[in-house]
Image (tube, rainbow, N blue to C red):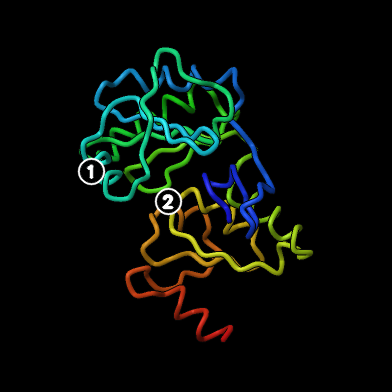
C-alpha cells in the first residue's frame, strides 16, 4: 500500500518496504512559512501519528466517530523526526489562498522539496525524492516487474509523476486542468463519479 503521497509503502503484512522523510533540518522552516496565517490548519504525519497545529471541530467530530484522532503539536517547536509529509488545509477551502503558500514555499525552498496539491484545498509538502511514481517503482520491483507493466489512474497534481512513469497512465476526466496540461500525451478516461476506473478494468482486464 502506497501512502503519504509515496513517502511510505507497506506490504500486505503491513511491513514497511519504503520510507522517505522530510529532512529534519527543513521541517521547522516549512512550518514557519505555513504558520504565518492563523486560520490555516497545519498537519504533519509523523510515522503513524497525525499531528495538527490547532483544534479542528469538524475533524474532531469525524475522529470521534472513527476512533482515528489527531494529536496537537506546538508549531513554534515542531517535531522533526520521522515526518513523512506536511500539509495545509483552509477552513473555507480557499484554493487561491493556498496557492499563495505554494508560491511562498517554492520561493524559499525551490526544488529541494516536493510541493503539490492532492486536492484543490489540500497543499502537501514531502521530501524531494518522494512521489507516488517512485513508490510505484518500489512496489513493482518488489514484485519483480518493471514500470512498463504498471497501470495507474489519477486526478491530482500529486499523481503526475506516477502517471508519467507508469507504462499506462490514465488521467481522470474530473482531473484538475493542471494535471491534463502537465500530461498532454496521456489518455483521459471517464470521471470518478461514473466509476470510470472500475469500468476500464472490467472492459480491458476482466
Residue where numbered disc 2 is placed: 178
Residue 151 screen position, x and y as percent: 61, 68
Residue 61, numbered label:
1
For the point 35% across and 25% down, the residue is 53
Q: Which one is closest to the eye, mark 1 or mark 2?
A: 1
Q: Position of residue 12 (x, y in %)?
A: 63, 60
**Residue 168, how many percent across, how many down?**
61, 68
Instruction: Work out whether 188 lies above or below 61.
Output: below
Quarter of the picture holding the C terminus: bottom right
Please, is residue 152 above or below residue 89 in the view?
Answer: below
Q: In the image, is 110 to the left or to the right of 145?
A: left
Crowd band around label 1 with a 10 angstrom C-alpha radius: few (<14), some (14–19), many (20+): few
Badge 1 or badge 2: first in the primary sequence: 1
Residue reaching furthest to the right: 144
Disc on res. 75: none
Secondary element at tag 2: helix
Using residue 164 as the reference point, say whether residue 95 is left or right of it. left
From the viewer's side, name the closer residue of 54 and 196.
Answer: 54
Q: Nearer the viewer, residue 56 or 30?
A: 56
Single out the residue that lies furthest toward the top: 76
Amino acid at each position: 500500500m502506497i501512502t503519504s503521497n509515496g513517502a511510505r509503502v507497506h506490504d500486505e503484512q503491513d511491513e514497511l518496504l519504503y520510507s522517505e522523510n522530510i529532512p529534519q533540518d527543513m521541517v521547522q522552516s516549512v512550518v514557519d512559512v505555513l504558520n504565518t496565517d492563523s486560520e490555516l490548519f497545519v498537519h504533519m504525519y509523523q510515522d503513524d501519528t497525525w499531528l495538527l497545529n490547532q483544534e479542528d471541530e469538524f475533524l474532531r467530530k469525524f475522529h470521534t466517530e472513527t476512533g482515528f484522532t489527531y494529536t496537537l503539536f506546538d508549531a513554534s517547536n515542531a517535531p522533526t523526526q520521522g515526518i513523512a509529509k506536511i500539509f495545509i488545509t483552509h477552513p473555507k477551502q480557499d484554493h487561491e489562498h493556498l496557492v499563495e503558500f505554494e508560491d511562498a514555499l517554492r520561493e524559499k525552498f525551490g526544488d529541494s522539496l516536493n510541493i503539490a496539491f492532492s486536492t484543490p484545498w489540500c497543499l502537501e509538502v514531502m521530501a524531494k525524492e518522494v512521489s507516488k511514481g517512485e513508490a510505484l517503482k518500489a512496489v513493482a520491483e518488489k514484485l519483480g516487474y518493471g514500470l512498463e507493466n504498471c497501470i495507474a489512474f489519477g486526478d491530482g497534481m500529486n499523481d503526475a509523476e506516477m502517471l508519467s512513469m507508469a507504462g499506462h497512465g490514465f488521467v481522470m476526466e474530473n482531473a484538475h486542468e493542471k494535471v491534463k496540461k502537465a500530461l498532454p500525451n496521456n489518455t483521459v478516461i471517464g470521471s470518478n463519479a461514473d466509476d470510470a476506473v472500475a469500468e476500464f478494468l472490467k472492459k480491458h482486464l476482466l
